[in-house]
Amino acid sequence: MVLRTTKTVLFGLFLGTLMLIGCVDKFRPKKEIRTNCPQGIEPIRKVLFIGWDGVRSDALLMADTPHLDSLLPNSIYSFNVDRGPYTVSTPGWSSILHGVWPDKHGLTENSFKKNRYDEYPDLLTLLRKHKSVLGLATLSNWDAFLQITSEETYAQRFVTDPEMVGDALRILNECPPDVMLLHFDFPDASGHEFGFSPSSLEYLSSIEITDNYMGQLMAKVKEREAQYNEEWMVVLTTDHGGEGTGHGGQDNLQQTRRVWYVVRTPTLMQNLINDGKIVDLMPTMLTWMNCPLSGLTLDGNSLY
Ligand SMILES: [Zn+2]
């Protein structure tokens, strides 16, 4: 009787040990790993900035740009935007990405010699200061564009636009940065060769091709928004227009100095602005990324 009881107790202990071992093994083969965020979690905000170098507003309006047009219902946009004096690219992109006019950032020509970037930091530098863990990428086929910002986790120069778009799509697919800056130089090159004019078919075609690249990127952005609880601000703009086959020293020419922008998020209401300022884009992107503007010396304001 005593022996039988001991055996029963020992058998019970054996069973208990087996059950304990079973409990330790929590990783059952049928476990599902979800990569998208559950409902109720704050969406992750990101920025895709696409510069279209040298695109005149009236030529943009004349060109067939279905992908840009499809953004407008969720955009703040303007086709009459002051890009400031010194109508070449480096001062223009500096005003856009440093949020101040040339009297502050110091650049009046396509050279970085007189820059005061230390005093007036760029978008990426300010975001990095605000939050150290951020993926920041710049892709361009023009060397100087890569000099305008700092603090990238990925910066790459390309020979051709298709190569650049391919790499951008790969990054968006595999490991999308929090902020991605792209710069397409083709419209500017086409304007210098065939004329910055809405009556130049070659120039219009370069704008339409750039719109097509943007459409490919936008399809990927929308796919990510649907699958991964991300919200993307997409900013499109240019640095100058042009007249004839040039654009430097044309501060008083509307077709060169007055440009355009489109700022899209999934939730913005359509809002056409009659008189815009290019320096408003940086505070708009900083606000979207929850980076406070207080304490910064900027010449523009957030658009929303
Ligand atoms: Zn140019």
Image (cartoon, rainbow, N blue to C red):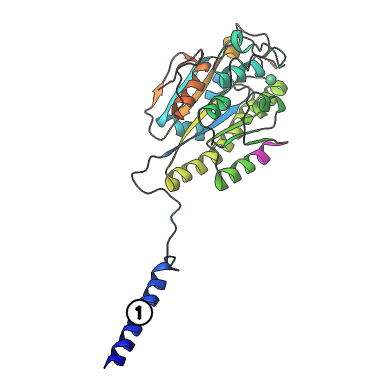
**Residue visible at 48% across and 16% down in the picture:** 295
Q: Quadrant of ligand 1?
A: top right
Q: Residue 7 or 242: which is nearer the viewer?
A: 7
Q: Position of residue 161 (x, y in %)?
A: 67, 36
For badge 1, the amino acid type reads Leu
Neighbourhood count class around disc 1 (C-alpha, 10 Å): few under 14, some 14–19, many 20 upward: few
Tell me where the magenta segment starts and ends, as one range: 158-164
Q: Position of residue 227 (x, y in %)?
A: 44, 48
For the question of whether residue 248 can be seen, the reply is yes
Q: Position of residue 153 (x, y in %)?
A: 62, 36
Q: Residue 27 or 278: which is nearer the viewer?
A: 27
Which structural element holds mark 1? Answer: helix
Q: Residue furthest left?
A: 1
Residue behind mark 1: 13
**Residue visible at 57% across and 48% down in the picture:** 174
Q: Residue furthest top?
A: 252
- Determine whether 144 is above or below 249 in the image: below
- Determine whether 70 is above or below 122 in the image: below
Q: Is mark 1 within 8 Å of ligand 1?
A: no
Q: Residue 204 or 34: which is nearer the viewer?
A: 34
Q: Quadrant of the N terminus?
A: bottom left
Query: Within the magenta stretch, is there residue 201?
Result: no
